[in-house]
Image (spheres, grey):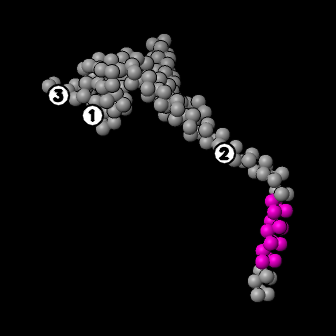
């Protein structure tokens, strides 16, 4: 019996000590919220916000579908839109084959570039030119220099 009373006394004094420590920690709980809020903000800006932007762009793309657009479905089927309805799109896959899909099944609308469109300059990380485009510029300038040197040599030979 004395052992039970000893455990009960130790338990109540331990709980009283824990309550006192918790009372002292209440002031520190505000400091523990700062990292939690920071993590939530980081998750919002790195994960949630970009996903929402992508979802809005996809919705705009789906809403802008019209007859004649080349599309790719989420299943990988390539085709041309032959007609559109409120929630579905009819895609012409082959000469006599048409398939009806939900608008949400369209993953990409293919945009053909004109043949005479200038090639965009490729840029790497932080807006710098990629090494391949820099190498092309060097080769082009070397060609111009060699052509100019050849012309100068030919004009020098004609003078003599």
Q: Residues within 10 Å of mark 3 (few under 14, many from 20)?
A: few
Q: Position of residue 141 (x, y in %)?
A: 51, 24
Asked whether the residues under the numbered discs 3 and 1 touch, taking CB atoms below 8 Å apart as contact, a structural biologist would say: no
Q: CA distance from mark 3 to mark 1?
A: 12 Å
Q: In the image shown, does 7 or 136 lie closer to the viewer?
A: 7
Please identify the quarter of the rendering in which residue 77 is found: top left
Task: Count the numbered circles shown.
Answer: 3
* Residue 18 falls left or right of residue 141: right
What are the residue bounds of the magenta stretch? Answer: 8-22
Q: Is 98 drawn above or below residue 39 in the view shown? A: above
* Residue 30 falls left or right of residue 56: right
Which badge, 3 or 2, comes first in the chain's sequence?
Answer: 2
Kind of element beneath mark 1: loop
* Residue ID at (15%, 24%): 95
Q: Which mark is residue 39?
A: 2
Q: Dot 1 corresponds to which residue?
A: 77
Asked whether the residues under the numbered discs 3 and 2 touch, taking CB atoms below 8 Å apart as contact, a structural biologist would say: no
Q: CA distance from mark 2 to mark 1?
A: 41 Å
Q: In the image shown, does 58 or 143 lie closer to the viewer?
A: 58
Q: Is 48 drawn above or below residue 110 in the view shown? A: below
* Residue ID at (70%, 43%): 37
Q: Residue furthest left?
A: 96
Could you tell me which quadrant the N terminus lies in? bottom right
Q: Is residue 127 visible?
A: yes
Q: Does residue 61 belong to the magenta stretch?
A: no
Q: Dot 3 corresponds to which residue?
A: 97
Which badge, 2 or 1, comes first in the chain's sequence?
Answer: 2
Q: In the image shown, does 74 or 125 lie closer to the viewer?
A: 74
């Amino acid at each position: 019996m004395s052992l039970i009373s000893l455990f009960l006394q130790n338990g109540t004094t331990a709980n009283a000590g824990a309550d006192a420590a918790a009372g002292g920690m209440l002031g520190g709980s505000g400091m523990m919220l700062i990292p939690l809020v920071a993590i939530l903000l980081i998750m919002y800006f790195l994960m949630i916000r970009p996903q929402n932007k992508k979802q809005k762009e996809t919705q705009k793309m789906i809403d802008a579908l019209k007859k004649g657009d080349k599309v790719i479905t989420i299943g990988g089927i390539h085709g041309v839109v032959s007609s559109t309805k409120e929630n579905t799109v009819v895609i012409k896959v082959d000469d006599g084959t048409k398939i009806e899909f939900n608008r949400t099944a369209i993953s990409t609308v293919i945009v053909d570039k004109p043949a005479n469109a200038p090639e965009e300059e490729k840029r790497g990380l932080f807006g710098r030119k990629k090494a391949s485009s820099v190498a092309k510029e060097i080769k082009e300038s070397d060609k111009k220099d060699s052509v100019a040197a050849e012309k100068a040599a030919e004009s020098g030979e004609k003078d003599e």
